[in-house]
Amino acid sequence: MTNNSPINSAAADAGKPRPVIRGEECKGCGRCIAACPKQVLRFRAGVNVRGYKVAEYVGEGCIGCCLCFYTCPEPNTIAIHNPKRPAAATRTAEPASASSTAQPLNPATPPAGNQGAVA
């Protein structure tokens, strides 16, 4: 029986970082296990639907270093859930000051000096 749940351990604390391993995508190379400085990954008993031994999180001890993520050769197999890391900053436009001379870009109007360009 395989566990295709993206969360590998019921003991994983929601407030701490942890790797989320998609077992159906894992090819069992063991690179993530070897790269983990805290040794909190291991091979799960049994195999996945493709016949590979799958890496799993032991349930505690992850420090969120992301080495497992970066060493995994399979895209989208490992994600790091890190609730303490701030969300990705979104760039917000600062309000223009009264002395600002910047004009909004109007895509319908070509820039000056580019009037004779051939499309």
Image: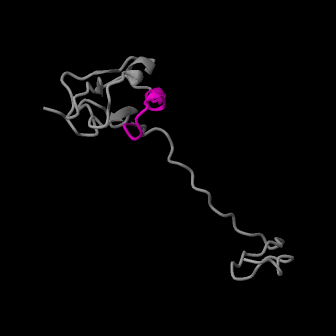
> Does residue 93 appear to the left or right of 31 in the view shown?
right
Please identify the residue farthest to the left as the structure is shown: 1
Image: magenta residue range? 64-78
Name, please, the residue furthest toward the right: 113
> Is 96 located above or below residue 5 in the figure?
below
In the image, residue 31 sits, relative to residue 10, either above or below, namely above
User: Residue 40 at x, y = what percent?
Assistant: 35, 20
Foreground of the two, 15 or 55: 55
Task: Confirm whether the magenta stretch covers residue 71.
Answer: yes
Residue drawn 62% across the image and 57% down it: 91
Residue under the point 70% across and 68% down? 95
Residue 107 percent coordinates (x, y)? 69, 78
Front residue of this view, candidates 10 and 73: 73
Q: Is residue 70 left or right of residue 54?
A: right
Give residue 12's quadrant in the image.
Answer: top left
- The quarter of the rendered structure image containing the N terminus is top left
Label count reads 0
Q: Tell whether position 41 is magenta.
A: no
